[in-house]
Each structure stands twice: as C-alpha cells, then as structure tokens.
Amino acid sequence: MSHFDQARFTHMKDGTQEDWAIIAKDFSAYARQLPSRILTHLRLLDGDFGGFPVDRLTHSLQTATRAHRDGRDEEYVVCALLHDIGDTLASYNHPDIAAAILKPFVSAENLWMVEKHGIFQGYYFFHHLGMDRHLREEFADHPQYRETIEFCAKYDAAAFDPDYETLPLSFFEPMLERVFAQPRNSIYKAAMEKNPAAV
C-alpha cells in the first residue's frame, strides 16, 4: 500500500476530506467481510463443551435449526445462531456481545430478545446456583417478555440434545450474508443511502 492509500493525519482533528475518502473506501470493503469474520468467531465455539452435553457451536447451530424448522424468519434465525457468540470473550455478560454485533442489522424486538435472553434462560438453572430464577419477572411488562420466554423455552433451553439432527453452519451462511448485507439501524444507514460508496 502506498503512502497515498492511507490518511495522512496523526490526530483526527487534522483529517481532511481526502483522508476520509480513503478511509471510507477501505471501510466499505472491510464491512462487506463482516459475515466472514462472524463465521470465523462462531467456529471458535467448536469443541468447547464447558461441561454441557453438546459443544457451544452445536448449541448455537441447534438453537438456529430449531427456530428455522419452526418457521421463523431469517433475521430471527440469525439471532438464534449468534445469541451465544460472546461466550468466548464475555463469560459473565455474553448476551451483550451478541446484541452489540446484531444491533445495526436487526429489529428492536429481536435485539431486545437477544440482549435479555441470559436472564430469561436463567429461569431453568439459576436456582441450582443459589440465584433467583425469577429475575426475568422484572421485565414482565415489556412487550417482548412473552417472545423472549418463548425463544428460551422452544429454542435455546432445548438445544442441548446430542442426538438432534442439527443443520451445519454452511446452511446458515447465506442467511447471515443477507442479514448483515447492510445496516438498517445505525448512523451509517443514512450515510449509505446518501452515498453508497462512502461507507
């Protein structure tokens, strides 16, 4: 890469329009590779059992498989696939990682479900760890309360079966590509609509 393919500032306050055109062009190519980077990170869950009956990748795939077979739309299925992607880096708050990745690309309803699923999933095991299994009740008045209970009951909590016919990651790759094709809920959406080559 030549010097002219990089911005010349050393402090952002000195950046020029030409600098930011270079950065925007590079960012556009980098952003298109996001689905590939997400798949790479998902594969880190392969073989990581953490004491569970299936490894974390199988759990994620099985959650998505169950949602898909139940007729959920692609966005929901991708949320199901990624709901535990934060396990490797955020052992205590993994839903926050998944929510941060998904936030620009999914509906507010699906985002809330992913963000809160850890507390709702706790209904099935918190009491075994000396915790309150009913913590989800603080959200009883939220519009997504029932939907999040259903996500956990039908897809997440049920996805630990070694004998279940789980679809492979390759099956979900096209869905992931489509959901992450471009943001729909961020400041970048307006920029892309105004100038698609700039972001």
Image (tube, rainbow, N blue to C red):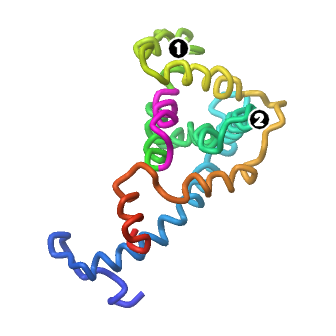
> Considering only vertical position in the picture, is 39 above or below 197?
above
Q: Is residue 162 visible?
A: yes
Identify the residue at image location x=74%, y=31%.
70
Q: Are marks 1 and 2 in contact (CB under 8 Å)?
A: no
Residue drawn 50% across the image and 58% down it: 182
- Label 2 Cα neighbours within 10 Å, binned few <14 / some 14-19 / many ≥20: few
Quarter location, residue 163: top right
- Residue 2 position (above or below residue 40): below
Locate residue 186, reporting x and y percent: 38, 52
Q: Tell me if 61 is positioned left or right of 193 in this view.
A: right
- Asked if 186 appears above or below 15 in the picture, the reply is above
**Label 2 sits on what residue type?**
Arg
Q: Nearer the viewer, mark 1 or mark 2?
A: 2
Check the image and report above or below for 48 versus 131: below
Tag 1, which secondary structure?
Answer: helix
Q: Amino acid at mark 1?
A: Phe
Res. 13 image quadrant: bottom left
Q: Is residue 71 left or right of residue 112?
A: right
For mark 1, what is the residue? 126
Q: What is the span of residues highlighted in magenta in the rendered image?
A: 105-117
Q: Residue at x 73, y 35 (%)?
A: 71
Q: Secondary structure at mark 2?
A: helix
User: Does 129 sit left or right of 14 as displayed?
Assistant: right
Q: Is residue 35 magenta?
A: no
Residue 48 visible in the displayed image = no
Quadrant containing the C terminus in the rendered view = bottom left
Q: Tell how many labels.
A: 2
Q: Which residue is mark 2?
A: 69
Q: Indicate the position of residue 41 as horizontal and vertical percent values.
A: 57, 52
